[in-house]
Image: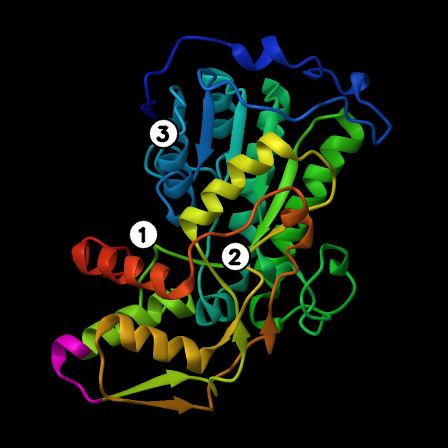
Amino acid sequence: MSADVANRRDTAAGQEHWPHTVSDPADARTTDDVAYTPGALDRSAPFYVAGHRGLVGSAIWRHLQDEGFENLIGASSRELDLRDRAAVEAFIAEHRPRYLVLAAAKVGGIGANNSQPVDFLSDNLRIQLNILDAARTAGVERVLFLGSSCIYPKLAEQPLREDSLLTGYLEPTNDAYAIAKIAGILHVQSMRRQYGLPWISAMPTNLYGPGDNFSPSGSHVLPAMIRRYDEAVRAGDTEITNWGSGSPRREFLHVSDLATACLYLMEHYDGPQQVNVGTGEDVTIKELAGLVASATGYEGTTSWDTSKPDGTPRKLMDVSLLRSLGWSASIDLPTGLDDAVAWYRAHREQARGA
């Protein structure tokens, strides 16, 4: 099986460095104690980025390269179907990473989540179970699982705190995806409790940036807007219609900021609590449309189709925990949008969903 591997060394470092490798369930721990002190990761150790060609995974891959990691491991979906348990077990057993970020997932916007709940639930559960179970068997020392802000109840108090998890009903348009991500958090917490593994979870807010999905039917709100407004500019259109009322408030984080937060958490945090990752600031969808119009140069009018669903009224993350650890976002929304629009225009023909 082929794989993208940067300067890969032939090593089984995963089992050499961590004392809690578990091959027999009888060796499982039964307490919440995890004997691990976060610190700088070994830049020469094997590091597997699951989903390294997606929006999140590619940003993490670039950041790790910039930070001097020499032994990055990744496989495309054509090389490795993460829903195939046997194939995942064989891949991780062969490469034996010491570190792993689980950034692979089936993702989409409101329309896709609402119309394909079985796909989002089944695919994501299988991906997570396969990777996390195989990582435990192979003795992967440090794992970061990435979820989503949609795990929190639809009407949870704003901003969304980590302890709001499982305190109310989910937004019904993406509840299947949210349940899968909640299962991933509990899987990581269970690995800590049963096997004493220093694995952690991070919950990003809405993301955007290079490598996003720009499909008109399957993308999230911001890349869909970028495509729509760019097409209007190129076609000379003077009116655009967006879904919903435009009143919901959303928070947006540039994916490069998320990438830096992921490495920061792996080197500075260890605990069972999932960590929110965001900017701590939000805008209305109408305000977002205005910013996208400015970034693309669109000068026409925008109307709103209120027959379409708005989704959750507000999703703003409480990032107090992350800030207390010493990390804050550095890319403001207008700057990030300029970057995202420039990337899309430079890669328009090759961009996902084009």
User: Which residue, given by chain and number where applicable, does mark 1 sit on?
Assistant: 210
**Callout 3, which amino acid?**
Gln
Residue 34 vs 169, above or below: the answer is above
**Callout 2, which amino acid?**
Phe
Please tell me which residue is depicted at 65% across the width and 57% down the height of the picture: 179
Tell me, yes or no, whether the two marked residues, 3 and 2, touch with CB atoms within 8 Å. Answer: no
User: Which residue, given by chain and number where applicable, does mark 3 sit on?
Assistant: 65
Give the magenta part as a residue range: 233-238
- Of callouts 3 and 2, the N-terminal one: 3
Q: Is residue 237 magenta?
A: yes
Give the camera-side residue of 41 and 177.
41
Please tell me which residue is depicted at 63% across the width and 49% down the height of the picture: 323
Residue 120's disc is 2
Q: Quadrant of residue 163?
A: bottom right
- Of callouts 3 and 1, the N-terminal one: 3
Q: Position of residue 71 (x, y in %)?
A: 40, 19
Residue 181's disc is none
Label 2 – label 1 distance at C-alpha: 23 Å
**Callout 1, which amino acid?**
Pro
For the question of whether residue 347 can be seen, the reply is yes
| Side of 97 relative to 255 (left or right) | right
Label 3 – label 2 distance at C-alpha: 31 Å
Circle 2 SS class? helix
Label 3 – label 1 distance at C-alpha: 16 Å
Quadrant, the C terminus: bottom left
Mark in the foreground, 3 or 2: 3
Q: Position of residue 301 (x, y in %)?
A: 28, 90
For the question of whether residue 275 can be seen, the reply is no
